[in-house]
Amino acid sequence: MPRETRTIDDMNNALFVDFLYTLRDYGVPASPKELLDLNIGFEKGLVKTLDDLFIFSRLTFVRRVEHMDGFERAFAFYFYGVDIPAVAPDDMDLFQTKQFREWLSKQIEEGELPERALYTMDPQELMEKFWETVREQMEEHHGGNKWVGTEGNSPFGHSGNAEGGVRVGGQSGNRSALKVISNRKYIAYSEKNKLRSDNLRQALESLKHMKNVGAEDELNLDKTIYETSRNGGEIELVFEREKRDRMDLVLLIDNGGYSMDPFIDLTRLMFSKMHERFDEIKTYYFHNTIYQHVYKDFRRTEPLKTEKFLQRKDETRVVIIGDATMAPEELESPHGSLYYYAQDPRSSTYWLKQISDRFKHSCWLNPVPKETWSSIYGAWTLNRIRDFFEMEDMTLGGIKRMVEHLSET
Amino acid sequence: MTATAEHTFEGSERYYLDPELKSIVNIALAMEKPLLLTGEAGTGKTQLAFEVGKALGMEMEVLRAKSTIKGEESCYNQDTVLRLNDARFGAGETGRQVDKFYDYVIWGPIGRAFRADKRVVLLLDEIDKTESDVQDNLLDILEECSFTIREINETIKADIRPAIFLTSNAKRELSDPFLRRCYCHHIAFPSPDQMGEIVNLHYPNTSPKLVEAAVTIFYELRDRGFEKPPATSELLNWIGALEHNGQMPERDDPPLIGILLKRASDIQQYRDGGGKRRFR
């Protein structure tokens, strides 16, 4: 992924073409049109310092706030030669990134850290050390990068309030590109980020307007007048369909077993937002997987026959929330249910298939992060269930894809 | 960042302008691109457009979007009822002539902005409330700076491109083609320091101690993950009320909490011991 950092010669003949590709590598959907806009701005003299360039190119290339973090990292890489991993500063996932691994082995090699630092040191401390190095690197901005510190040679000319072309650390409230990037304040909007109530609301909002049907019983006054006058004064009534946002949504929630415990908060949040978003929403509960009954209440005392459930209109949107991890026999074998009183001769796979066959617009929402789907305990059943349902995780990106599945007609 | 002096925005008395945002506004003005501002309530999206208009001495044209809007009426409306009436009963002494289309046109904000003989600020407020095809139509119009009057097939084109601002509460996602045509900026919620400056602009005479205490409590409340966290306007109202009452905000039991927290469930949660940590 990483490309060589730039030299001054590139600037003179290239119109930042390779910056475009760097951006695309970092997940920012940049196109040549924006590159042209960027160059128009150069001609207009909009860019005098690297900070100007940062703000201007961000405006030009970034459309969605979820691409903001990618842009900042691409910018840091291209102009500062620093490769920032795509995780939040306090995220333990840092330890799995390539950047961290490389840094760690270098530190160990240089004797800065003990051999088994990853196991012997406090993770918090280790993380802080890493981010400190990143910050230092950005401030020193060495490593063959020629954009910064070229002073008189800089393509951006002299800059009155900057040292060597960059305002390091910012002065009197001035925000430098550097400071903005090291803040990482847009990571929260990145697609991989977990859900919070505000971004969830936004994602669900796009489920709107999927169904604009109803009888043609609303008088359109404008059109009536228009048609009447076209009709030489003879009254011509124009009726239209009422526009309503109506969708039949059913939630099936796995609320039993310890395996869902870590996800209770997340599920509850999802649940409350779904209710906020849709006036009419039906919820049923199950434990681990679905057999011949689903339950109308949280405590699972009021059963509803799954057969009965299957009689709902086939345009019903079904969202199943569960971790989909269990023992294989719970899913596959007849009488698979853990409950001794369940006398179901058919396996759960049978019922899941029935549901997915009946309701084309269904989606399985899994609180377990997608990255771990192949490795967690119970991965076998999880992936088996994916044979029947589109499965997404509960990240912003996952919810958006779920909305897409449900919106298909 | 330079643009011609008359079109450089420097902020104004009652509006705290973040330096970064200032650059962005000026870039958008210089590049003649629509600037889409997103961000949660209380970040001053709408106000920014008004301040730009005020600071640069430009007239404002404002379209407050509704979900029922179709786009065309924001450019022009033909008063068909009046025309029908005139056709049937005569225009009397109004001077209108039934065969003259323009006698019955009511210009919408976009129409007025395009026909103006000076550069104006055109604000399309809460654009996300409209349907997505309406948004696409509107942007065609804004990009070309022209629209066609369907009834007589005439094109209205702006001689002077207005400075266009759009705001969105991000209630609904905007489409990619829409976003591609504007500059987009997400206004982050002000930091405590910035908030101090904002408060000072509104209450220059309030004691700094009160302001500091209030702002601290305000950010603590925001961190607690309420359904509707208090926003800037609530803080300003709260400080105003505190000053009026001569009260000092106390961390343990802030007075007039109802000004900051609006939802019943939030107030309940607050009373029950302060609420959960923000969900991560």
Image (spheres, coloured by chain):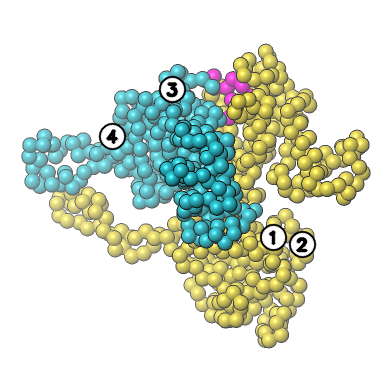
**Mark 4–mark 3 distance (CA, rounded to whole Å):** 31 Å
Marks 2 and 4 in Cβ contact (< 8 Å): no
The kind of residue on which mark 3 rests is His
Q: Is residue A386 placed above or below B236 in the rendered structure?
A: below
The kind of residue on which mark 4 rests is Glu
Marks 2 and 1 in Cβ contact (< 8 Å): yes
- The label number, if any, that marks residue B7 in the structure image: 3
Q: Colour of chain B?
A: cyan
Q: Which residue is mark 4?
A: B154
Q: Magenta stretch containing residue A44, yes or no?
A: yes
* Horizontal side of residue A26 vs B115, given as left or right: right
- The label number, if any, that marks residue A376 in the structure image: 2
What residue lies at 19% left-to-right and 52% top-to-bottom?
A228
The kind of residue on which mark 1 rests is Val
Q: Is residue B224 placed above or below A182 in the rendered structure?
A: below
Instruction: Answer yes or no: are tags 4 and 1 on the same subunit.
Output: no
Instruction: Answer yes or no: are tags 4 and 3 on the same subunit.
Output: yes
Badge 4 local density, few (<14 within 10 Å), some, or many (20+)?
few
